[in-house]
Amino acid sequence: MTKIAVWCRHDGDNLIGIGAKIPWHIPSDFRRFRKLTESEALVVGEKTYESFPNRTLPNRDIHILTLTPEYEVSDPAHHFVHHDIKDFKEFEPNLYICGGATIYKLFMSSGDKLMPDVIVDCKYLGAVDALEGPRIDITPCIETMEKKYLKMSPDYEQENVLTSLWVKKGDFVDQGVLKKLINIISVNN
Ligand SMILES: NC(=O)c1ccc[n+]([C@@H]2O[C@H](COP(=O)([O-])OP(=O)(O)OC[C@H]3O[C@@H](n4cnc5c(N)ncnc54)[C@H](OP(=O)(O)O)[C@@H]3O)[C@@H](O)[C@H]2O)c1
């Protein structure tokens, strides 16, 4: 398994959400996220899952972390509930860690077996919408990334978003996964 964290953060303040929403609309970023994760396995926190339209994303398996007993998903054939991040220690397929802040922090602070191998770091340079709710940032994850990871691709710019790949220092990463990621983030779509 390769574990890949994917986020889009606002440049400067590492903001990723306000209330339940992402405070910007970048069609190319959504398209690229769909392409990156299509036919793959994703893990998200319950709040991020609830923010998906109709609580789903077609053509991929979604693993939801929640502490709520008896949590009901919208598509039991493809959506799976977990109450403990340790379930992913022996997970076999590649795993895309897709937020929110709580889930990024859990994976980045739960020891080597769960730390992402690769980070797809998207930095949005534009203005942020005024939305209701608390501001949610991932500053602790960025600090960990800057200490423990190596930037291994140049920034690719698209619609005001700079994207690069970071790889955990000293770790072997499946070359096929890296090639796919570089191909997707470097091609304009
Ligand atoms: N910009 C981006 O790239 C991006 C990506 C994803 C999300 N977001 C944004 O991030 C925000 C949501 O982030 P968030 O941090 O508030 O919520 P979240 O990470 O999506 O979900 C948090 C939930 O995870 C569950 N949880 C927490 N700790 C757990 C544990 N140890 N074991 C099992 N489950 C656990 C809890 O669910 P229960 O309460 O059900 O127990 C908790 O409420 C939204 O604004 C969203 O739009 C942005």
Image (cartoon, rainbow, N blue to C red):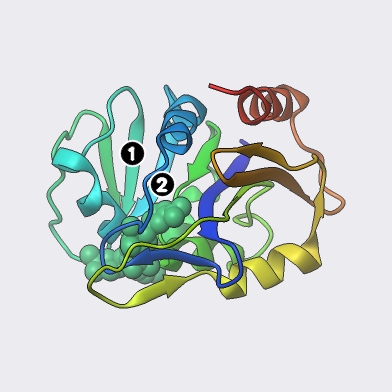
Identity of the residue furthest to the front in this view: 127
Mark 2–mark 1 distance (CA, rounded to whole Å): 6 Å
Residue 67 visible? The answer is no
The answer as to whether callout 2 falls within 8 Å of ligand 1 is no
Looking at the rendered structure, the secondary structure element under dot 1 is: strand
* Mark 1 closeness class: few <14, some 14–19, many ≥20 residues within 10 Å: many
Looking at the rendered structure, the secondary structure element under dot 2 is: strand
Identity of the residue furthest to the bottom in this view: 134
First in sequence: mark 2 or mark 1? Answer: 2
The residue depicted at 63 percent of the width and 31 percent of the height is 185
Residue 102: percent from the left, percent from the top? 42, 68
Q: Quadrant of residue 34?
A: top left
Q: In the rendered view, does 148 fall on the left or right side of 116? A: right
Q: In the rendered view, does 76 fall on the left or right side of 155? A: left
The residue depicted at 55 percent of the width and 33 percent of the height is 94
Q: In the rendered view, does 38 fall on the left or right side of 46? A: right
Residue 87: percent from the left, percent from the top? 44, 52
Q: Amino acid at mark 1?
A: Ile
Number of marks present in the image shown: 2
The residue depicted at 21 percent of the width and 28 percent of the height is 77
Residue 18 visible? The answer is yes
Q: Quadrant of the N terminus?
A: top right
131 or 133, nearer to the observer: 131
The answer as to whether callout 1 falls within 8 Å of ligand 1 is no
* Mark 2 closeness class: few <14, some 14–19, many ≥20 residues within 10 Å: many
Q: In the rendered view, does 43 fall on the left or right side of 46? A: right
Task: Say which mark, if any, is on residue 62.
Answer: 1
Residue ID for mark 2: 43
Residue 28: percent from the left, percent from the top? 47, 32
The residue depicted at 61 percent of the width and 70 percent of the height is 12
Q: Quadrant of ligand 1?
A: bottom left
Circles 2 and 1: CB atoms closer than 8 Å: yes
